[in-house]
Amino acid sequence: MHQSFSIGGETLDSLDLKALIVAKGVKVSRNVYERFGRTHRIYPDPLTCNCLILPDGTIVQMTDLALHMRYLKTAILLEALRNIKYTMRLRTPFTLDLSSDGRPILLHDGALITEVSFPPASRFYEQRTSSGLPYLGNAVLQGLDFLSFQCLWPCQFAKTGHACQFCYSGGVVERLSKRKKPDPPVPTPRDAAEIVEFAVTKEKSASHIQITGGSTLNTQAECQRIVQYLSEIHRVVGLENITGEVLVYTTPPRDPTEVDQVFAAGADRIACSLEVWDKELAKIITPGKAKFTGRQRHVDCLTYIAGKYGPNRACTSFVVGVEPAESFLAGARYLAQRGIVPIASIWIPFGRPVMGKMEAPGLEYYRRVKEGLAGIYEDYDIEPPGSFGLNVCLCRDIWNHRSEINAA
Ligand code: SF4
């Protein structure tokens, strides 16, 4: 049962609140880091992908705007923020502070919304692989049970100057490439396997893993590279010891049968992310995908997977908030009808403008998405990845609460 909250006289459920917090960010008091930094997984570092947990268990990405701005300046994304009209909008009504008796509380314009909690303490971000690669900046723990690699190989679409407008890592690669600088270092298969081993079998801070790289122009080689990562993870950890899902993101190959080797190597699901359904908006927001792969190749590959491996084995991620809710939901329904899982990742607008804007849509937008997706998941028996939910995605939360949402 999800909980209700009151903000400015309006009643919100936990999913409404999550969408607003993810999209607007939070101002976190230093007292919170000092009080909980040793007992819980919360750090004054944006690379650790902090999250808070609402009383009903909903996991929420907690982007501390002050830390985030400092990170953007060092991550050479400042160019995107030079225009003061953007930076002036980086304000949030949400703050996280301590109550008078030392408990973490979430406030909106200074008024109490609710008490929150954090995941248990972890040693994950203190680790380095045997090659010396720090975990920090190369992998993140999400929520209570998910290990995600941000980018195991650089995005070639971004290197050709076609980064997606919303993508931080694509933006970094694009700018490095324009300046003829080398790509940032990425984990090797051995590094990745050691990171998985620590999170899954040593610390037990994750049961699901997500393999993600940038989009590539040679999709055959990309599938082979993913197989190398999965094979090394299997050699070091044993795929049978990963009790959750292995979710792999890949560029859709021209020949969809290329993904067979990825399933054979241990993927439970494969995602080819469309990000935007509306074709005209996709040309502007995801120029590389529109130019090099295009919507139809994504749909063909996903349909192949669903046809050969069954429903719920093919996924596609959408950035929720950059296109009208109606076009997103039309795409989600089209795909769900074919057994493909639409994943809803909330657009975080501070960092890179999309179509010249850095303002997320309002509450009504997220409510339409929530109600629409809950109906689609139920109508077509679609189940998104994960169990407790991820930091930025709304899909698993919607699925977890689909009966209540559909009954309302
Ligand atoms: S194609 Fe993927 S990695 Fe590349 S810029 Fe777009 S979202 Fe980022």
Image: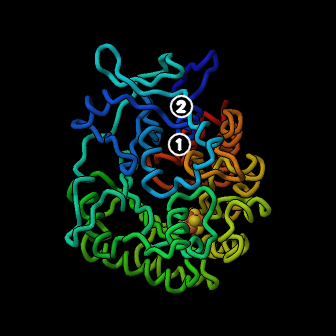
Ligand 1 appears in which quadrant?
bottom right
Which residue occupies 41% across, 41% down?
Answer: 67
Where disc 1 sits, the SS reads: helix
Q: Residue at 44% of width from left, 38% of height from top?
A: 66
Q: Is mark 1 within 8 Å of ligand 1?
A: no
Which of disc 2 and disc 1 is earlier in sequence? 2
Q: Is residue 220 left or right of residue 246?
A: right
Residue type beneath disc 2: Ser
Residue bearing mark 2: 14
Residue at 32 percent across and 63 percent down: it is 242
Do we see residue 177 in this rendering? yes
Please tell me whether mark 2 sits on a helix, a strand or a loop.
helix
| Corner quadrant of residue 98 | top left
- How many numbered circles does the render carry? 2
Residue 271 seen anywhere in this rendered image of the structure: no
29 is higher (above) or lower (below) than 112: below
> Label 1: how many residues lie within 10 Å, few (<14), some (14-19) or many (20+)?
many
Say which residue appears at 46% left-offset and 42% top-offset. 61
Q: Residues under labels 1 and 2: Cα distance?
A: 9 Å
Q: Quadrant of residue 37?
A: top left
Numbered tag placed on residue 397 in the rendering: 1
As rendered, which of 402 and 270 lies closer to the eye?
Answer: 270
Quadrant for the C terminus, please: top right
Q: Residue 203, how many percent across, how many down?
A: 22, 53
The foreground one among 242 and 127 is 127
Q: Are marks 1 and 2 in contact (CB under 8 Å)?
A: yes
